Image (cartoon, rainbow, N blue to C red):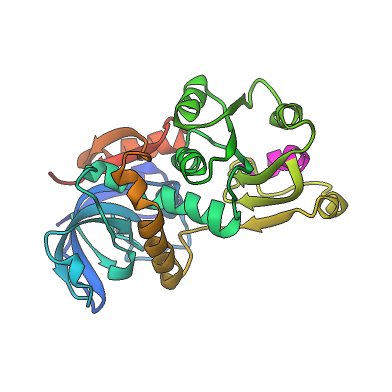
Amino acid sequence: MRAWSIEKPGGRQVLQQIEVEKPVPKQGELLVEVKAAGINRTDTLTRQNTALTEPYPILGVEVSGVVVENQSTDSKLHAGTRVCGLVNHGGYGEYVTMPDERAIVLPDELTFEEGAAIPEVFLTAYQTMYWLGELKEKEKILIHAAGSGVGTAAIQMASQLSQATIFATAGHPEKLEKAKELGAHVLVNYKEESFAERISGVTEGIGVDVILDFVGGSYWKMNLESCAVDARWILIGTLGGSEVDKVSLGDVMKKRIVLKGTLLTPRSDDYKAQLSQEFAEVVMPFFKEKKLKPVIHVVIPFEELPEAHRMMEDNENTGKIIMKVSD
């Protein structure tokens, strides 16, 4: 089968298309014929990871496709079932194995391209907002990187599941317009104004209850100012740096802020299985009813993967970049 791996860790030029044997599912796994795969920042970071040693993995952690073989006891995942979900590696191939507990049945109302745009970003947003951020109905939430895959997913779920008041930041007008379309109430172009000042004005100095922070270091002071008393601040990225000078722990204590850091990809198989199963039960019906929708920036052919990585690294996308693997 065709697949994408790397010659060695490095830039986009190390990506290489290879021919490998079709994987064989173990007990408790599915063999899935991949129809589409999502492109994620995790993939570009894996490609650059100098700690990797040969044999280098097939990249890709997010797929949609059709079950070909079921080596699990879950009879509903029979051959021919349309599924999407997270895999540990191997998503950039024509076939991949997936633990049955991580498979999410894909409704007929969604295309395979849409299915591949769901698992990584919607599961990340769900666990960040609800398992860690404990977002409650009608609370106020600040979502940074509003035009990203996770950002667009978070805005929709905060709106549809929680009727939250949503503050969204981005650096491009078209990304803010998309955020508004998806349910954001207060839009801030971080290149033109301070989101902390805007939040203070709108909330009369109270602040927000939950922050989804992709940025980290450079936003520390403004995020701290934006927190309400008892706010939950969830750090899921460090696009603005991972170090902060002169942190005042007293300010954190005065507001009783809960600060949590998280990554989804390194989580255990059991954690991802529990998250996938809860998400399938709680959130997937909203897709079937068209109340939630994956936001896709572009669908690229299998042969053009390096261009997809370029778009991801240049931050061009509003929503997901999807690779079509087969018809």
Q: Quadrant of the N terminus?
A: bottom left
Task: Decide: is 198 above or below 22.
Answer: above
Q: Residue at x 46, y 51 (%)?
A: 45
Place of residue 178 in the rendered image (x, y in percent of width and height, measured from the top left): 45, 27
Foreground pick, 253 / 141: 141
Picture quadrant of residue 196: top right
Place of residue 207 in the rendered image (x, y in percent of width and height, measured from the top left): 74, 38
Q: How many labels, in total? A: 0
Q: Is residue 222 magenta?
A: yes
The magenta stretch is 215-226
What type of secondary structure mainly makes up the magenta span? helix
Place of residue 306 in the rendered image (x, y in percent of width and height, measured from the top left): 32, 40
Foreground pick, 181 / 67: 181
On screen, residue 257 versus residue 51, left or right, reads right
On screen, residue 165 versus residue 114, left or right, reads right
Task: Decide: is 319 above or below 17.
Answer: above
Q: Residue at x 78, y 30 (%)?
A: 204
Foreground pick, 126 / 286: 286
Task: Decide: is 325 above or below 317.
Answer: below
Foreground pick, 164 / 247: 164
User: Can residue 35 be seen here?
Assistant: yes
Q: Residue at x 32, y 66 (%)?
A: 55
Q: Residue at x 42, y 31 (%)?
A: 318
On screen, residue 286 versus residue 250, left or right, reads left
User: Can residue 4 be seen here?
Assistant: no
Q: Quadrant of the C terminus?
A: top left
Place of residue 152 in the rendered image (x, y in percent of width and height, measured from the top left): 46, 37
Q: Is residue 235 magenta?
A: no
